[in-house]
Image (cartoon, grey):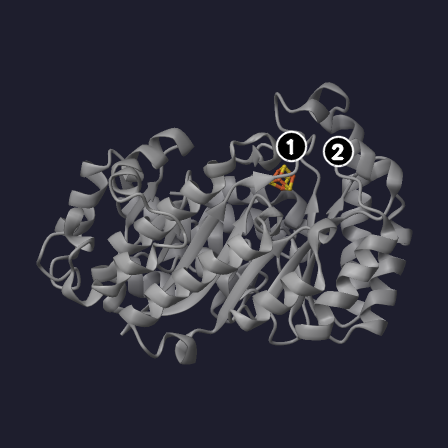
Amino acid sequence: MDDISIYIHLPFCKKKCYYCDFYSLPAGSLPETFIENYLLAVLLELLNYTDLLKSYRIKTIYIGGGTPNIIETSRLETFLELFFDILKKINPDFYDNIEEITIETNPEYISRNLIKMLKDEGINRISCGVQTISKRSAEILGRYISKNKIISSIEIITENFTNLSLDFMLGVPGHYIKDELKFIENLNYRFNSLKHISAYILMIPFGTPIYYKISEKQTENKSIKEYNYFNKFISQLGFKQYEISNYCKPGFESKHNLVYWNRQNYIGLGATASSYLYNVRYTNSCIAEYYQMFSDCINDRNLTLSNFKSLTEDLKNHTFNNRYLRNDSVANNFYKNLLVYIKKNNINHELLNKTQMMNEEIFLSLRKNEGLNLNSFFNEFEQDFLMDKKIEISRLQKMNDLIIERDNIKIPSEKFLIYNNIVGELLY
Ligand code: SF4
């Protein structure tokens, strides 16, 4: 049985951070029923995949956003119960087989009640967005959370979870990287559950509020210095870098994110979520169109999270999920079903050709410290990458931008900052 992963997009936040160009909505200004209906739509979308999921082992689930834990705890609990209940009906061994279920959280909305609920629902990994402990930087980013609140939230998480990941941001004006690292060092000393750190360089997306305050030029030098300093210091704390922006204790890589970088199968549920199944990549529409796909069902049946269960009782009889997927098994007739689904719902999609797949393999693999495996590349595409790119590889090697170690070709971590330039030279 092949593996598949699931991403759930819950695009609700307190307010828009100044640097954010992700798809998210301010939870406080939405009508009462909006979030509930969105969660119902996600459950209905999952039901559409029932036939497909029967043929796979679910490897990882990632609940991201947005800020999933801004959703009222009891509502989130009901949603998760219903979601996992569907998966258990599809595959009774679901909980035994799954390797990782992560939820993204904001420390501002961590409570004992929430954390206990997440644990009870089977979540086994928490990712928590700290970004910075500097008040000044946090205000520039538009997301101030006090250091005390961050610490108390981590304390609460680690009472119940042994696999915690924290997000930080590099290159932010106003903070001192030494202070941020000192903070991580203290956390590392105090909390054995801290297994993973993500450190992203601040980007200044066009049109965001931060774009009108700060230029990329202003942060460029700071980012370079901080990235190099961070890489050096974090390894002394026992975190190994395994991807451009990700570091972990041995064995605690994000299994879900590795699915993306290894070009493995995943489905994305929710507005604007992307999926990748073999060589088809497709993206759900924005929230209005996404909701439209499911609104008839929600309205006709007066669905709420409280009465949703009745809909899944007869899941075994396939009374619902054939709405988009036809009677034949997805495993036997994969493309037909997937393409029927995509066409029917007018979903943006791209059927990748060989060149596109090779290029994806190159740029995704080279994000990782282990790099691109030349044998796997040849076995999959029947192309000799070393021969095909002989001139470029030799030039990059001379500049120490690329190294070859046994069967792997990789970018040294100190050159990750020019990853785009390096990869740009290696694509087909
Ligand atoms: S919490 Fe994340 S998704 Fe939400 S506004 Fe901030 S950066 Fe965007």
Image quarter where ligand 1 lies: top right
Query: In the rendered image of this protein, does residue 339 appear above or below residue 193?
Result: above
Can the viewer see residue 83 in this picture?
Answer: yes
Query: Which residue does the image show at 55% across and 36% down from the upper left?
Result: 24
Q: Is residue 384 shown left or right of residue 197?
A: left
Labels 2 and 1: the sequence-earlier one: 1
Residue in the foreground of this view, choosing between 266 and 405: 266
Kindly tell me whether mark 2's CB lies below 8 Å from ligand 1. Answer: yes
Q: At label 1, which amino acid type do we have? A: Lys
Quadrant of the image containing the N terminus:
bottom left
Q: Position of residue 199 (x, y in %)?
A: 70, 52
Q: Is residue 210 shown left or right of residue 295?
A: right
* Residue projecting furthest to the left: 328
Query: Which residue does the image show at 62% across and 47% down from the upper left?
Result: 70
Query: Which residue does the image show at 76% across and 76% down from the upper left?
Result: 192
Quadrant of the image containing the C terminus:
top left
* Contact flag, marks 2 and 1 (Cβ < 8 Å): yes
Q: Separation of disc 2 and disc 1 at Cα? A: 8 Å
| Secondary structure state at the residue bearing disc 1 | loop
Residue 233 sits in which quadrant?
bottom right
Q: Position of residue 94 (x, y in %)?
A: 37, 74
Q: Which residue is mark 2?
A: 142
Q: At label 2, which amino acid type do we have? A: Gly
